[in-house]
Each structure stands twice: as C-alpha cells, then as structure tokens.
Image (cartoon, rainbow, N blue to C red):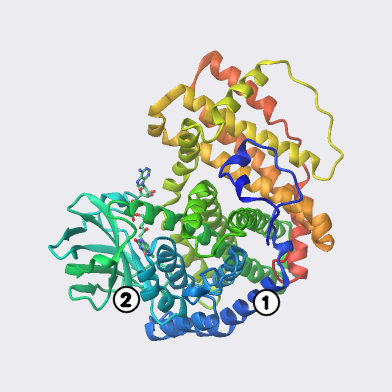
Amino acid sequence: MTTTATPAEIKGGAWLLEESAPGDTFTPERLSDEHRLIDQTAEEFVSKEIIANHEQLETKDWELARQLVRRAGELGLMGTDVPEAYGGVELDKASSVIVGCRIGQGGSFGSTYGAQTGLAILPLQCFGTEDQKTRYLEKLVSGEWVGAYCLSESGSGSDALGAKTRATCQEDGSYKISGEKMWITNGGFADLFVVFAKVDGEHFTAFLVERTYPGVSTGKEEHKMGLHGSSTTPVILQDVVVPAGNVLGEVGKGHKVAFNTLNYGRFKLAVMASGGATTAIGESARYAAERHQFGRPIASFGAIKYKLGEMTARAYAVESGIYLTTGLLDAALADHDANDAGLFRDTLEELAVECSILKVAGSEMLHYVFDENVQIHGGNGFVKDYPAERHYRDSRVNRIFEGTNEINRLLIPGTLIKRALKGELPLIPAAKRLQDEIMSPPSLSEPSDELLGEQRKAVAAFKKTGIMVLGLAMQRYGEKLTEEQEILSWAADILIDTFLAESAVLRALQAANDAPSSAALQQDAASVWVNDATYRIEAAARSALAAMDEGDTLRMNLGALRRLLKVTPVNTTAMRRRLADAVVDRAGYSLG
Ligand SMILES: Cc1cc2nc3c(=O)[nH]c(=O)nc-3n(C[C@H](O)[C@H](O)[C@H](O)COP(=O)(O)OP(=O)(O)OC[C@H]3O[C@@H](n4cnc5c(N)ncnc54)[C@H](O)[C@@H]3O)c2cc1C
C-alpha cells in the first residue's frame, strides 16, 4: 500500500481546485523494503548488463538487444505490474516506477524497454481479450518476444487519427491491412506489432500483427541524432491478412487504445527522464569535484554551484510529481482484482492531465540537466570520451515522441476545460468565486512562521492564477479558445509549475518526519522551485492576459495578478549552493 487515499478520492486535475494537506502524499521516502529490493535488482541489471554493453548496443547489435530484453524478462522487470496469470510479478505501480527510473539510466535501451512495456504490453494488458493475453502477453512479459507500436505514419504523427493505413474486412471475418508506418521503435527486430489502421478507411482500429504474417516487412534503420542503440524503422504492411481474433479493443475504438496507451507512456517517459537526470547530476558532481581550473575545483565556483543546485531542484520537483501521481494510481487500483483492466484504463484516463504535465516537465527537465552536464564538462562535454555528449543527443527526442510537448501542452488545459464544461470538474464556479474575491478589498496576510508556510501560500496563489487565466480565457473565447494556442500553452506552463510546486512542497514537508537527515535539503529544493516558479508563472500569466485584453480591462487584470502573486523572494543562491555542495559531497543526486 503506497498511500492512504481511497479510489473515490482520485480525481484528475482536482489538485488545482483544492488545498492539499501534507501527510498522505506518496514520496520516494515511503518506499517499502520490497520496493528497495526491486530497485537493487534493476540497478544491478542496468549497471552490469546494460551500461556494460552500451558500446556494443550502439553498433545496432539487435541480437544483444534481444538478449537484454530476455534477461529483463527473466528478472521480472518487464512485467512488474502485470498480473501473475500472464507471467507478471503483479506488484504495484510504484514498483514499475522504480524499475523505469533505473532503466532510464541505461541510455538507448530505455527506448527498447519503453516500447516493449509501455507500448506493447500495456495495450494488451488493458484492451486484450483473454485469448489475446494468453497468446501474446506472457511471451512479451518473459522477453521471449519483442513488441512494437505502430501509430505514426509519414503524413500523420501528431495528427495520429489522420492515418492512411487501411483495413478491409474479408468474408471470413479476417482483415486485410495495407499501409506504411514510420519511426517504429523496435521495428528492426520486433515479433509483434500493435498496428493502427482504419477499417474501410474510416473506423480507426488497433490490430495485433505478427512479424511472420505474409506481407509484413520493415525498412532500413533510420539514421538518428541519438538513441543509436535503439532500433527505429518503417513498418510496411502489404495486403497483410490478420485474423478477426487479432482486433485489439473494438473496431472503431482504436483511439481509446492509442490514447490510453500514450497516457501511461507519457508518465513512464517522465519516470525514465527522472532516472536519467540523476545519472547526469552524479556525472556533473564528480567531474566538478575533480576538474581544477585557476587552482581550484570548478565545484567551488558559484556559477557551477548554481548549475548543480538548479539541476537538483528541477530533478527533485519532477521526481516529487511522479511519486505523487504514482500514489494516486496505486490508491485507485488498491484492493482491486489485478486483472481488472477496465479500472486501470479508467484510472489512466482520469490522470491524463497529470501524465501530460509530467511528460512535458520530465522531458524539459532532462534537457536542461543534460545541457548543463555538457557545460560543466566544458570541452570534454562535447567529445565522445565522456557520456555527457551522448546523453545530450539521446534526450532530444523526448520532447518529440509520446505526443510532442506542444501537443501535450494543449492537452493539459484542453482536458481540464472539457471536464469543466461537462460538469466533471468545478472549474467554472471556482473561477467565478475567484472573480468575486479579486473584486473585494484585499485582506492583509501576516508572514507565516510554519515550516514552508510561505511556499504553501505561494502554491495557493499559483492555483488561483491558473484558475484566473483559464476562467478569463474561457469567458473571452468560448468554443474558439482551441484556436488560441499561445494562451493555452501559457496556461499549461502555469499548471505544470503549480503541480510540481505543490508536489515538491508536500514532499519536503513530509520529509521532516520521513527523512530528517535530508529534510533541510528537500526544503531548499522545494523552495528554489517555488521561488522561480513565481517568476515563470507571473511571466506566463502576464503574456496570456495581455493577449486577451487591453486598456482598463488589462490594467485591472494585471492588478489582480499582482495582488495574487505577492510572493516574497527567498535567498535561492544560498539554497542552490547547499544543494550543490550536497551532490558533490555525496558524489551524486540523493535527497531521499
Ligand atoms: C526515435 C523515434 C522513435 C519513435 N517511436 C515511435 C513508435 O514506436 N511508434 C510510433 O507510432 N511513433 C513513433 N515515433 C513517432 C513520433 O511519435 C512522432 O514523430 C511524433 O508524434 C511527432 O509527429 P511528427 O514527427 O509527424 O511531427 P508533426 O506532427 O509533423 O509535428 C511537427 C511540429 O508541429 C507541431 N504540431 C503538430 N500539430 C500541431 C498542432 N495541432 N498544434 C500545434 N503544433 C502542432 C509539433 O508539436 C511539432 O513541433 C518515433 C519518433 C522518433 C523520432
């Protein structure tokens, strides 16, 4: 059991409208001994079998990639949260987060693993019939078979439902599929493809297609910027006959399979990013301690401390958001039959906003950390003798796949607004209440002397800012708001910062009890995030308000924003220095 919340309380996006109390948030400090054992297994697998074989993998040795998939299967790392009935270990989602985090430290293999677990095993687990699960799930979980997910085409990436691949129903109920899929991870050696095609050119549907079916072939490996140890190829289907029993989910409901799979994929991408960031922070810390310039270790310079401290604070905020969301997932699924795929699907859908937030935040945090890792390594960061160069290339795609960050940014406010309009989320009444509050005379607030009291007040102000921008935008544009992507993206930025600020503050507060030895550092990390989130949120809100109105209305809204976001700056320089010194002393990121 990872959290005290009950399934009925799990409501995606509800954090924006409610004040969360510290005490029942799931954090890395609350991992059990069982979780730590899994972590150890995954850590040994990654260091001894993946990192040790990295150079060979980068030569595109797919036989080796297959062996590693098999080995991960033998260790139970492919099916950590899959029911035992299908060869899985049937543990909680926290266990699969721990494994994902470690795998994220293993470079390109993370992509192979992510496609196998998140894009092949997951849709089968959530949408497969009993017969399909029996035929395929165990083979994938054991690593005997490799899976791939074929959604994108040369003409349809973000616009996935615009796919041209076509399926035609035959007299005997089987389907004939023709089309060409692009950029398919594991394409070069997968045995099973989850293929999306339109039945009669209209009904978007998922199919399970075996590599051995006549008419299936794969194209040449793409020459990629990074992830050289992961296979990416086109998958070509020429009049491939697929049995009726291999329709995954329902005909015409392929979007459900595609989007729910992507929800979990986005969450897992953030998990792997979190793992990757800890590796790079360790590399930077060790290098900065060893590298001397001007007769001193570069770690002693304020400019380098700033980087190490900022890398740590950003990694901490994302990690906190991941664990908070993991707690929600596990709470929703606790005490339910592990085979209840419907509940898992519904929970993923419920947490779609959190998954998109984490995808954007995780990939952008990783990009920042890897970029600064190169910078701290100086010239050595630009040459292949050090891993910093490879990390930098490998990570770029994280902002592109699993839904680009632009698409995910649009989904964050878009999903909340849709739920508000359906009456599922009381955002509209909250926006009205806030308008009344803004119109009334300001109340004076005393500085808080509680632990992180000012940061908690800041988080409450961030939420109000998000509600204000969303409320005004809905009022101003109505149904045409979808055309105002810049405003939606600024709203997304506010929501991302807010969610992570709250996650980090709740975790740091709990650390006072859960992890006294690192509590002060956790408070520093959360405070740095909140302090700088204030500036980012203010800038995003000002841009959004200025795009919506002008003259007196704009002046009035900007005045309201100033009143809402009255956050006193803290000495983040000292905090970053403490965080930097800690990662250098500990030779790596460890705030837990
Ligand atoms: C290494 C790698 C592995 C991959 N693995 C897989 C896989 O296993 N399976 C699979 O199916 N696919 C896979 N993909 C494909 C990936 O999911 C797509 O590349 C991605 O969805 C983006 O689609 P696109 O490349 O067509 O870009 P486009 O959709 O053409 O986007 C181009 C730019 O326009 C922006 N844009 C597009 N539409 C909008 C809009 N409505 N509003 C605002 N901005 C917009 C995008 O954000 C982006 O910045 C992989 C790609 C790579 C590079």
Q: Tell me where residue 327 appears, x and y as whole percent.
A: 64, 56
Q: Is 559 left or right of 173, judged from the image as shown?
A: right
Q: Write down the residue under mark 2.
A: 188
| Disc sitting over residue 37 in the figure | 1
As drawn, the residue found furthest toward the right would be 449
| Residue drawn at x 52%, y 15% as measured from the top left | 551
Q: How far apart are marks 1 and 2 (CA)?
A: 33 Å
Mark 1 vs mark 2: in front: 1
Front-lying residue, 151 or 443:
151
Residue at disc 1, CB closer than 8 Å to ligand 1: no
Any part of residue 291 in sight = no
Q: Is 533 left or right of 115, judged from the image as shown?
A: right
Q: How crowded is mark 1: few (under 14 residues within 10 Å), some or many (20 or more)?
A: few
| Residue drawn at x 48%, y 51% as measured from the top left | 346
Q: Mark 2: which secondary structure?
A: loop
Amino acid found under the numbered disc labelled 1: Leu
Choose top left, top right, bottom left or bottom right for residue 270. Answer: bottom right
Count of numbered marks: 2
Q: Is 580 left or right of 497, judged from the image as shown?
A: right
| Residue drawn at x 19%, y 59% as measured from the top left | 167
As drawn, the residue found furthest toward the left would be 171
